Image (cartoon, rainbow, N blue to C red):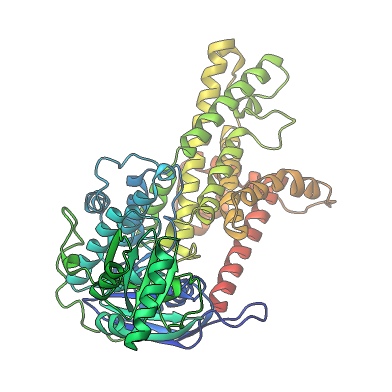
Amino acid sequence: MLQAIGLTSSPRRDLPPAVEDLTFEARPGQVTALLGPAGSGKTTTLRLMLELEPGRGVTYFRGRPLRRVAHPAAEVGVLLGDVPGHPSRTLRSQLRMLSAAAGVPASRADEMLRAVGLTGLHDQRIGTLSRGMDRRLGLASALLGEPHTLLLDEPGAGLSARENAWLQELLRAHATDGGTVLYTTKDPKDAARHADRVITLHEGRLAGDQDVADFARTRLRPRVVVRTPHAARLAAAVTQAARAARRPVEVVAENGNRLSVYGSDCAAIGETAFRHGVLIHQLADEVGDARSQTPSKATRAHPETAAGTRNAGATASPAGATTGPARAGRDQVTPPGRRRPSRSPLRPLRYEIHRLLGVPATPLVVASVVVASVLSALLLAGGGRTPLPAVLAGWPALSPLPPAALGAGLLGAFSFGDEYRYPALTTGRGAVPRRLGLLLAKLAVAAAVGLFLAVLVVVADLEAVRLVYGGDLIPATENWPTLCASWLGLVIGCAWAGVLGAGVFRAAAAGVAAVLSVPVLLVPVLRNVPSGPSGRTIAGLPARLRELVNMRWPSAVDQWLTGAVRVVAQPVGVALALALTALLCAYLFTGLRREARW
């Protein structure tokens, strides 16, 4: 049972709330239509139910508010607007990523592609989808977690009659399996034809809550549709005959040769046309919408509008469509729990890997970094004046950062920036959540990518210099642990700065700006800070640490620790550490502030 109680949106700019004191319910095993014209508050109602819109009221999903549902993707499937996915991502990679977020096996992605009729299109890009295929992918995303409830906003908008029929059959199959379906529509015909219950909204308030039979009987208006080249002549004859018989008949002229006659039947209209010698091209009974007409003269107002006859065959399941196994006992109400909801992906590390590898930007950035670094290394080595570490890093003096650090920062910025631009997680729970598990997964993947780039660039630059200039120009260095630690720390630190910068400011460009601010702004400031004489040094720190923990480790570990400490003590290391600390605090502060506001 889906119960919405007292939903009221927060008013904006001294305007009345879009939804005010709205209470209704949608029952399991039924398809419920939320009917209303544009601006009546249908979409705002769904967002209030999903806790994506500020306001008052509560919605119970089988006895629990959504914030108390541990795994929302298994309780509610959502389709609001277009599919929220990166346009360069393939259908399969999109669903695999969402499968990791919902905690279901990756094989579920292929199952849902077959279920919605997208077999063979798994490698097609989201940005190339037609409207019908976009709707199918959206339904596949909503059904990934085998949810009990489906909330769909105008799912049939822009679809052809055939695609809309397929959609309604799929929704009917889900309801027949015991699920709850609530979808919005502005077409009364669609509501009367496909829904079991119709909830009518008017200016954000409840105007009607009826089963489809009562809706059709009390809120729809039957009519006779006539097409004739002599519409004005027939209208006058029908009106004169009705007055003579003292019957309440209303004639509405539409589009020149079409008449809608209310309060009469086909036999009476046909006899009147025959007596007056009027040629008729069409004569049919329909269930019409009085408000949608444009009368040529004053007519009586009718309180409501709507639609056609109920499609009795709508309960048939579409060929090849599967909505998951039978849900035994799915209507049982579970008592409200005390657990916080799992708004992050249930498998954040797997989700992040699918997100990273699912778009062509990742291999493109890696290839660009390697090419730029190799070219820079060859130019620097040819000059003969650049130190070997700068040559292997491909870091010219004019550049604020080497290509590997810039590339790692850019990929890190994409990890959050692209999610705000193409929000993958809105399919199930709204805006990108600020959960610790998701942040740690992004930082771990960003560190792995940074490590891979750092090693790949050094190896590529080293081999390129050897191939072009020979191996004599590459002498061995004694302080290689310090150099390696500084190089890895720089690249991984830039990757983390990109992640946190994009997470705080909700844009990939902000993440890149956070990376560039370290060498451009912070390092010059720290270098200008006067430093007095120091009475203590870090010499012997590894030995003191070894004595503290009473352990023995190889001498190479001492060298690595000494190198790491020296790196952190440098202006670049201090600036990077300060930037990461500030970004992390800002990220946590904005996340806690956002949760408190909601």
Residue 494 lies left or right of residue 343; in this view the side is: right
268 and 458: which is toward the camera: 268
State which quarter of the image contains the N terminus.
bottom left
Residue 223 visible here: yes
Residue at horizontal 58%, vertical 23%?
374
Residue 501 lies left or right of residue 318; in this view the side is: right
302 and 80: which is toward the camera: 302
Count all numbered tags in the image, as a single digit. 0
Q: Position of residue 80 (x, y in %)?
A: 43, 64
Residue 280 lies left or right of residue 364; in this view the side is: left
Q: Position of residue 206 (x, y in %)?
A: 43, 86
Q: Position of residue 424 (x, y in %)?
A: 44, 56
Residue 570 visible here: no
Residue at horizontal 73%, vertical 19%?
385
Q: Position of residue 100 (x, y in %)?
A: 33, 56
Residue at horizontal 27%, vertical 51%?
109
146 and 171: which is toward the camera: 171
458 and 379: which is toward the camera: 379
Residue at horizontal 64%, vertical 51%?
510
On screen, residue 236 above or below 14: above
